[in-house]
């Protein structure tokens, strides 16, 4: 894409269209190549913007990333809310948690980039806004999880989210392999030595919930 020059947006709807164009362009580039190689200029070109147009909405690539990431978090939350309408057993909760998580593949792919992005070229305002929105996410997830697992207190829920984020950020890039890489590992007889992402997350979430229940005396060792 490229070559056309956007006029200044004159309404909230037009601004939203411009921002969505930039986010879609960034998402396409993040899928096609390494995050570190994606530049603000490349995002502008992909969206058909000039670089000066982009600066009306975002000042850095990192701020575009954060907007994209938080939009995916909102989608994850909405899915989680509708998938967990009431109390669930530990096993049911784990399965539904995983179903929702695996439906957000782009969020999984971006999660390991969150911490280094927040430490990079992000303005104080964008940093504060991101942290504020994450605090709101914690509250919203807390309501959903407490409804599905009434035995968990707020600290339990916060730890669950911390465990989940850490595992996703670490396990997703470690477990993902191209078809060629998978064939090489199979030829070497090593394919079973690398962890399966779904099994890793399922076991961790279930073990955490089981540990909380044991600690609270709700189930035996």
Image (cartoon, helix red, strand yellow):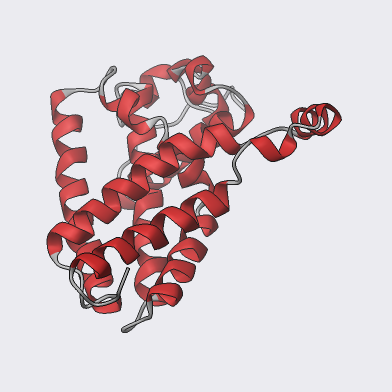
The percent coordinates of residue 144 (x first, y second) are 27, 71
Identity of the residue furthest to the front in this view: 221
Q: Residue at x 42, y 18 (%)?
A: 51
Q: Residue at x 81, y 34 (%)?
A: 186
The percent coordinates of residue 74 (x first, y second) are 34, 56
The percent coordinates of residue 160 (x first, y second) are 28, 55
Q: Quadrant of residue 22?
A: top left
Left or right: where 172 falls relative to 51: right
Q: Nearer the viewer, residue 119 or 181?
A: 181
Q: Nearer the viewer, residue 155 or 144?
A: 155
Q: Is residue 7 above or below residue 50?
A: below
Question: Is residue 99 among what the camera can see?
Answer: yes
- Count of numbered badges drawn on the protein: 0
Identity of the residue furthest to the right in this view: 187
Q: Residue at x 29, y 76 (%)?
A: 219
Left or right: where 94 falls relative to 133: right
Q: Is residue 218 above or below residue 94?
A: below
Q: Residue at x 22, y 73 (%)?
A: 146
The percent coordinates of residue 35 (x first, y second) are 50, 23
Q: Is residue 75 above or below residue 56?
A: below
Q: Quadrant of the N terminus?
A: top right
Identity of the residue furthest to the bottom in this view: 86
Question: Is residue 11 among what the camera can see?
Answer: no
Q: Quadrant of the C terminus?
A: bottom left
């Amino acid at each position: 894409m490229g070559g056309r020059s956007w006029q200044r947006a004159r309404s909230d709807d037009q601004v939203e269209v411009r921002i969505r164009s930039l986010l879609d362009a960034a998402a396409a580039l993040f899928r096609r190549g390494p995050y570190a190689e994606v530049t603000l200029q490349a995002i502008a070109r992909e969206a058909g913007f000039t670089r000066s147009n982009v600066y009306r909405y975002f000042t850095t690539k990192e701020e575009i990333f954060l907007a994209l990431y938080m939009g995916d978090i909102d989608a994850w939350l909405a899915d989680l809310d509708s998938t967990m309408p009431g109390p669930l057993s530990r096993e049911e909760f784990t399965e539904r948690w995983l179903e929702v998580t695996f439906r957000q593949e782009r969020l999984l792919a971006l999660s390991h980039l969150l911490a280094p992005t927040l430490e990079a070229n992000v303005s104080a305002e964008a940093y504060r806004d991101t942290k504020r929105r994450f605090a709101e996410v914690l509250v919203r997830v807390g309501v959903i999880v407490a409804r599905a697992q009434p035995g968990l207190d707020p600290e339990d829920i916060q730890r669950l989210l911390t465990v989940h984020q850490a595992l996703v950020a670490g396990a997703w890039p470690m477990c993902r392999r191209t078809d060629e890489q998978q064939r090489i590992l199979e030829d070497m007889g090593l394919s079973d030595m690398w962890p399966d992402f779904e099994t890793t997350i399922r076991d961790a979430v279930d073990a955490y919930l089981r540990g909380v229940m044991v600690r609270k005396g709700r189930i035996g060792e």
